[in-house]
Each structure stands twice: as C-alpha cells, then as structure tokens.
C-alpha cells in the first residue's frame, strides 16, 4: 500500500491534466525549470554577481575667487 503502481501514476497524471488543462502544463513545466535553474545559480554564488563599482576620479571643485574689495565711496 506504500508504493505507487503504474495505475496510480496514470490516475495522478489524469487528475493533473483535468485540473490544469493541456495548455497550462507546458507553462508550469517551463516555470518550474526556470525556478530550479535560478536556485542552482543562487546556490553556486558565482553566476550573475554584480561587478565591483568602478572608482571614478574625484570631481575638481570650481576655482575659488577672492571676494571683491569694497570701493571706498568717500573719495
């Protein structure tokens, strides 16, 4: 009673086909495959790691002009 016979597997497949329909099963299989692939890539940690940020040269500050000297109005 603990094992599945081929008849049991056929019944399970028939129920799945009735629940999801013939068009939806390939989409589900594709999504499952992509999920497994993403999981494997995530576990390896080597795939799709973002590159380190590129050091940009510092931006030069605009030149500082000395303040204007006040004009003496008493002349």
Image (spheres, grey):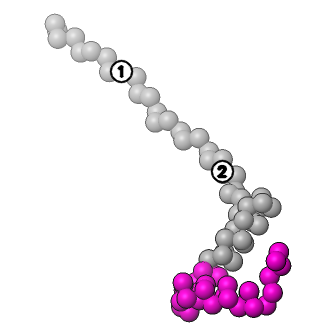
Q: Quadrant of residue 41?
A: bottom right
Q: Position of residue 32 (x, y in %)?
A: 66, 76
Between residues 5 and 54, which one lies in front from this camera angle? Answer: 5
Q: Quadrant of residue 65?
A: top left
At 66% from the left edge and 50% from the top edge, which residue is drawn? 53
Between residues 53 and 50, which one lies in front from this camera angle? Answer: 50
At 27% from the left edge and 15% from the top edge, which residue is drawn? 70
Q: Position of residue 13 (x, y in %)?
A: 66, 88
- Going from N to C along the chain, the mark reached first, 1 or 2, is 2
Which residue is situated farthest in the left direction here? Answer: 74
- Residue 65, above or below 70: below
Q: Which residue is mark 2?
A: 53
Which residue is situated farthest in the top direction here? Answer: 74
- Of the 4 image quadrants, the one containing the C terminus is top left
Q: Is residue 21 magenta?
A: yes
Which label number is shown at residue 55?
Answer: none
- Residue 16, above or below 50: below
Badge 2: how crowded within 10 Å, few (<14), some, or many (20+)? few
- Of the 4 image quadrants, the one containing the N terminus is bottom right
Q: Position of residue 55 (x, y in %)?
A: 66, 47
Q: Which residue is mark 1?
A: 67
């Amino acid at each position: 009673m603990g094992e599945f016979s081929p008849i049991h597997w056929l019944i399970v497949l028939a129920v799945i086909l009735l629940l999801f329909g013939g068009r939806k099963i390939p989409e589900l299989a594709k999504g499952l495959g992509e999920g497994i692939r993403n999981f494997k890539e995530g576990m390896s940690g080597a795939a799709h790691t973002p590159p380190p940020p590129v050091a940009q040269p510092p931006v030069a500050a605009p030149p500082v002009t000395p303040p204007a000297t006040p004009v003496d109005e008493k002349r």
